[in-house]
Image: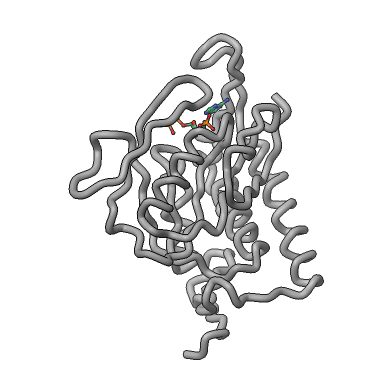
Amino acid sequence: MSNSTVVTDPAADQNGSSRLKSDAPASTSKLSSNEIEAIQRERKEKTEYFRQAISQTPDFPKPGILFEDIFPIFTSPSHHEALIRAYELQIQELGVGTPDVIVGLDARGFLIGPTLALRAGSKFVPVRKAGKLPGKLETVTYEKEYGADTFAIQTASIKPSDKVLVVDDLIATGGSAAAAGELVKKCGGQLLGYVFIIELVGLKGRDKLDAPVYTLIESQA
Ligand SMILES: O=P(O)(O)OC[C@H]1O[C@H](OP(=O)(O)OP(=O)(O)O)[C@H](O)[C@@H]1O
Ligand SMILES: Nc1ncnc2[nH]cnc12
C-alpha cells in the first residue's frame, strides 16, 4: 500500500459514518481549502447537534463550579455518533494524517479515545489516575479546577517518536491536560496536540499547554 493511500472502511456505509483511515505518515497529509471548508462545515453541524445533549449543573461538585455534564450525549446514539464524527473531522482538519497514538484521560477521555482510535486506525493509550496501572510507569502530580491528582502512564505504551494526540472531554485550568502532555513527553512521544469537547475559556487552561489546542465548544462560564 502506498504512503498516501486513503482506504475507506467498507463498514462505513452500513452505519452512516464515513470512516477514513489514512496511511500517510503524520507529517505529510495535505488538504485543499475546499476540503478544509467542507470538513469545518460538517464539524460545526455535528457539534451544534450533540451540544444540545450537554447539561449544566451549578455548584457541583463545589460551590462556584458550573458542572458541564457530557454523559447525556451517550444516552442517545445519534448524539454519540455526532460527537465522535465531530472529533474525527477535527482530527482530519489538523492535516497531520493519522496519529500513531490517541491518549485518553481517566475517566471521561475513555469515553471518546478508544472509539476515535478505532476509527482513525491509531493505537489507544490510557492515562490513569494513580494506583490503577501495573508495570513500569511515568507519573505526574497536578492541580485541576477542583483539587489535586496524580496521573500515570505505562512507559512502554508510547514509543519514542510516536505522534500522539491527547483527547479529553473538557479543559478547565489545563492542569490535567498539561500533566498528560508531560507524561507523553517522558515516554519520548511527540505531541501533535490536544482535542477537547468543551473549553472553559475564562480559565485560560490552553496557556499551560505547549502543543496546539482544539476545542469543539467554547464555554464562557
Ligand atoms: O483542566 P482541569 O482543571 O485539569 O480539569 C479538567 C479535567 O477535570 C475532569 O476530570 P476529573 O479529574 O474530574 O475526573 P473524571 O474524568 O474521573 O470525572 C475532566 O474530565 C478533565 O479531565
Ligand atoms: N466545570 C467542569 N465541568 C465538568 N467537568 C469539569 N472538570 C473540571 N471542571 C469541570
Looking at the image, residue 118 sits to the left or right of residue 67; the answer is left
Residue 163: percent from left, percent from top? 48, 64
On the image, the x and y values in percent for residue 167 come to: 51, 48
Task: From this view, report whether residue 154 is shown above or below residue 69.
Answer: below
- Whether residue 111 is visible, yes or no, is no
Foreground residue among 209 and 44: 209
Question: Height in image: 117 above or below 145?
Answer: below
Answer with left or right where residue 116 lies relative to residue 83.
left
Residue 67 point in image, percent of width and height: 57, 23
Q: Which of the two residues, 73 or 198, is positioned nearer the viewer here?
A: 198
Please tell me whether residue 11 is drawn above or below residue 198 in the rendered image: below
Residue 20 picture location, percent across and down: 56, 72
**In this orientation, does residue 148 appear?**
yes
Q: Residue at x 59, y 54 (%)?
A: 87
- Kindly give the residue lying farthest to the bottom in the view shown: 2
Could you say which is closer to the camera, residue 86 or residue 189?
A: 189
Apparent side of residue 126 relative to residue 58 in the rendered image (left or right): left
| Residue pictured at 50% horizontal, 65% vertical | 99
The quadrant in which the C terminus is found is top right
